[in-house]
Amino acid sequence: MTTLAIVGATGAVGSVMIDIIDARETVPWSEIRLIASPRSAGRRLTVRGQEIEVVALSEEAFDGVDIAMFDVPDDVSAAWAPVAAARGAIAVDNSGAFRMDPDVPLVVPEVNAAAAHSRPKGIVANPNCTTLSMMAAVGALHRAFTLTELVVASYQAASGAGQEGIDRLQAEIAAVAGKDVGNRSGDVREALSAAGLSDESPFPAPLALNVVPWAGSWREGGWSSEELKVRNESRKILGIDDLKVSATCVRVPVITTHALAVHATFASPVDVETARQVFAAQPSIVLVDEPREGRFPTPADVVGEDPTYVGRVRQALDFPNTLDFFVCGDNLRKGAALNTYEIAEELVRS
Amino acid sequence: MTTLAIVGATGAVGSVMIDIIDARETVPWSEIRLIASPRSAGRRLTVRGQEIEVVALSEEAFDGVDIAMFDVPDDVSAAWAPVAAARGAIAVDNSGAFRMDPDVPLVVPEVNAAAAHSRPKGIVANPNCTTLSMMAAVGALHRAFTLTELVVASYQAASGAGQEGIDRLQAEIAAVAGKDVGNRSGDVREALSAAGLSDESPFPAPLALNVVPWAGSWREGGWSSEELKVRNESRKILGIDDLKVSATCVRVPVITTHALAVHATFASPVDVETARQVFAAQPSIVLVDEPREGRFPTPADVVGEDPTYVGRVRQALDFPNTLDFFVCGDNLRKGAALNTYEIAEELVRS
């Protein structure tokens, strides 16, 4: 008898979570409990053919819960994941509240599943979506070749900024479409304004017909918080304290699926053929790498897919022990709900 | 008395070239001759207020020409630049035909102007637009710190594929706008098909709401020709035969202006403050780097601008002597017509 709770069940990631649970052949849960803010309590959602009433977030809501998955803002997780843990549940948290807490494991099951079983606070953290989008691929290569350095540039989708990000990009695209205005900043802003779009945006610059080299908040040295997450979370998940990482995080006018250009250096010699075998041996990776036939992963091909897609695998011409490749992962699935659920499955399996 | 010819005067880059010449306060040319295919001969274009009739490409068209700028396909340049040189003109060629020819200098005036004055074949080559978009910034840093390694990822605009690329992206944007289809590949392709767009595209995958990790043609080892151009042309322009370079070239749904995330390693210690001074001292660079105030370069801000825009300058946290930064350059101006014209100005000045 195992009870799973979804905290934030009515949110964007929560609804992807329910899709994922619906699509599973079997589930190990005797009860699935849906928890959300008092405002959403009383709503009825269907999970695996069964209507379930959403209950309001409260201490009592966690009574009898074995695993509670949190898909809520950082401050809600910070306040409530410890409450769930105190009531005896294992909290699996997809916010940024606990990821770098030394007493909270940060887990990608195909990379460091064992870490999930040592949790002094009763909490397991799910990584940031950008880190997650490449981690299955990077982790597999690390096992084979021992990773020492990562230089990455991201192509991040608007849905990384939530439903608000999706709505904004779609409204901007509609505003510039068919206008033949080119993409000069003044013309784009005029088109947005003519379409009634306010200057208030989840993005710090127009995103339609543009790319925006900023995600998250400002950090010492001019880094964005997103870039430091890629660095610090990669180190923690892989267990390499001195991993060298430089990341540049850039938002692109794509709705869903993050992509990254990865330049990865290893302690051991690498070659493309062995790397392909490493990827082929990992069920959560799909290799699409026949560029002569126009076959490589693009974000549009990966939307709604569970695996990480890898392509453009090349041996660096001038850097020893180094591979360059391109990776795409659905930021709402493996990048968020799917990995959280896979952690819950790992916990119940053991 | 100096005569300048524009070969390919009626093309996309040719018309930007005429805009650039129109905007110059003064020009050193006593005659400007417009040359194009026989199909375009007889058309009349206005340059600096004067109507000029386009003449057909022929050997005689180069009689009396001092400098002939070529903005034509590779095969046309390969055939005709030597003809212009044989008639006594200096050919400044913006195709890929001669860039890696050891007897042809590859020139970015603010980086290696002197190279333009040694030209065994009477030909000077203009670099590829992706290389050019970062070269002013990279060259300035090289002079200060001595470059040893470059890892770059590009965000390349549709106009890099010519007017056909612009038209395709605009048609795709119009087809997906307001459809609320998300960006799942099947849905996007259906929207393109419903809008009457054929599968024939200058891009190997849909570009609207997507990014495409491929530009150019296939090369040994899975590299794209565009990625090898970035490597080989950077080495030649900077005069560093053993420069280590890895590039990943990705097309993004932007009309004009290429952007690159650059990770650059040097022989000497670097710091952000000195790098900022290096950029500030270079008239062809504009530094926009106050991310806390939402100020960084985006492609839309740079369309139609001559300078290279640089921002997000950070000292790498884990790599010695290394800077990470983001650079934007209008691929039709500095990336093509402007640099070609600046080479012509350099030649006539000397």
Image (cartoon, coloured by chain):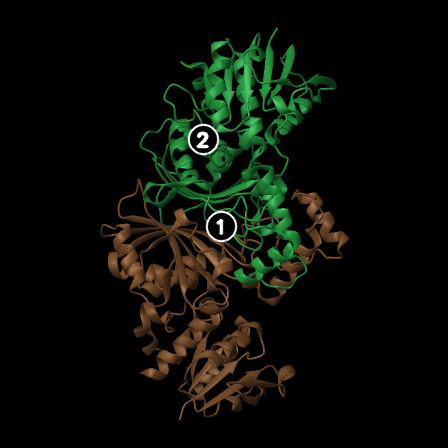
Chain colours: A green, B brown
Q: Which residue occupies the foreground of this view, A318 or A247?
A: A247
Image x and y of residue A73, in percent: 51, 29
Question: Mark 2, mark 1: which one is toward the viewer?
Answer: 1
- Image quarter where the C terminus of chain B lies is bottom left
Image x and y of residue A340, in percent: 54, 24
Is the residue A294 above or below the residue B23 in the image? above
Mark 2 → mark 1, Cα distance in angstroms = 28 Å
- Which quadrant holds residue A337? top right
Q: Which residue is mark 1?
A: A212
> At 31% from the left edge and 32% from the top edge, which residue is drawn?
A242
Residue A133 relative to residue A37: left or right:
left
Residue A255 relative to residue A223: left or right:
right
Callout 1 secondary element? loop
Q: Which residue is mark 2?
A: A139
Residue count near mark 2 (Cα–Cα under 10 Å), binned few <14, some 14–19, many ≥20: many
Can residue A108 be seen here?
A: no
Labels 2, 1: one chain: yes
Say which amino acid is labelled 2: Gly
Say which amino acid is labelled 1: Val
Can residue A169 be seen here?
A: yes
- Image quarter where the N terminus of chain B lies is bottom left
Q: Disc number at residue B53? A: none
Callout 2 secondary element? helix
